[in-house]
Image (cartoon, rainbow, N blue to C red):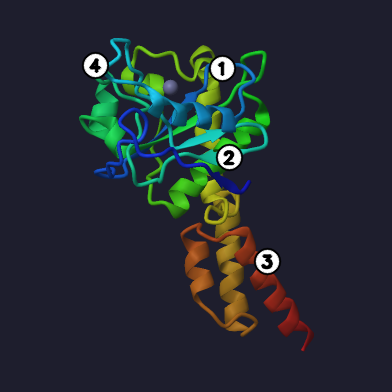
Amino acid sequence: MLTIQQQRIPVNPFSRPGKKLVAKRGIVMHYTADPGASAQAIGNYFSSLKNQNPDDGTGDRYASAHIQIDRATIVQSLPFDEMGYHCGSKQPYLPEALSKLGSYPNNSTVGIEMCIEADGLIHEDTFNNAVDMVVYLIQHEGFPEVIFTHKGVVGWKDCPLPWVRNPSELERFKQEVHSQLNSQEEEEDLNLSANQWTILTTQLKELFDKKLITDSTWIDKAAVKKLTVSELLFINTAILNRGIK
Ligand SMILES: [Zn+2]
């Protein structure tokens, strides 16, 4: 994973209210809607919002995200336990967002901005950097594996637009995060027919009786069809070793 570059927004009413999150309930994905703009440039923009004058009669913009990502850079603008303004809505939030994120999702989520190329698309490197970032947030910052898009929170905003146009990209993103989170844990059991499991169990019993294996739990595991490739390789090596002696 890329090093996270720190570029904090100064505390200000428009982009860093300085409030703590009330809980860590989810991760909200965005796109920058600014073709060709870098992660740093977007961070600078969020910081520049502090210069707005609330009393000048012009409309003020409240916006920020915790993280901006481009093809080669990850920039962090807000601490992960502080609130940003990335998915607020004056209209009602979608039911799934309300149920998983609470009544005001800004105060329970981290917001991630994905930069877009000049053609408006999210580059595959940016996509992969975002996968790394989300995996990091789940493994090291206490966020659950609950991934929303901005659109999925508020309903009315087409963000990230490339994923709104092509929803399979969101699914691919979630699957990639999930498989990275589980890559060390999920080893499949042996893919054997029922008859083969029976034969394997019988053979392990015979090997146990001959004291070529000494741990009967292997037999129990085979009997309930729960033996992995790694475990069988381990058993085979032990048997070969004892067979030679
Ligand atoms: Zn957005």
Q: Residues within 10 Å of mark 2 (few under 14, many from 20)?
A: many
Residue 51 falls in image quadrant: top left
The CA span between labels 1 and 2 is 17 Å
Q: Nearer the viewer, mark 3 or mark 1?
A: 1
Instruction: Tell me the number on the disc at residue 233.
Output: 3
The residue that label 1 is drawn on is 34
Between 150 and 95, the residue placed more toward the observer is: 150
Image position of 185 with respect to 168: above or below: below
x, y percent for residue 134: 49, 41
The CA span between labels 1 and 4 is 24 Å
**From this viewpoint, which residue is outermost toward the bottom?**
245
Of the numbered discs 1 and 2, the one sitting upstream in the chain is 1
Q: Amino acid at mark 3?
A: Leu
Residue 149 in sight from this viewpoint: no
Question: Contact (CB < 8 A) between labels 2 and 4?
Answer: no
Instruction: Tell me the number on the disc at residue 90.
Output: 4
49 left or right of 174 in image: left
The C terminus - image quarter: bottom right
Q: Amino acid at mark 1?
A: Asp
x, y percent for residue 137: 46, 47
Between 171 and 138, the residue placed more toward the observer is: 138
Q: Secondary structure at mark 2?
A: strand
Of the numbered discs 1 and 4, the one sitting upstream in the chain is 1
The CA span between labels 2 and 3 is 41 Å
139 left or right of 183 in image: left
Of the numbered discs 2 and 3, the one sitting upstream in the chain is 2
Q: Residues within 10 Å of mark 4 (few under 14, many from 20)?
A: few
In which quadrant of this rendering is ligand 1 seen?
A: top left
Q: Amino acid at mark 2?
A: Ile
Number of callouts in the render? 4
Instruction: Tell me the number on the disc at residue 194.
Output: none
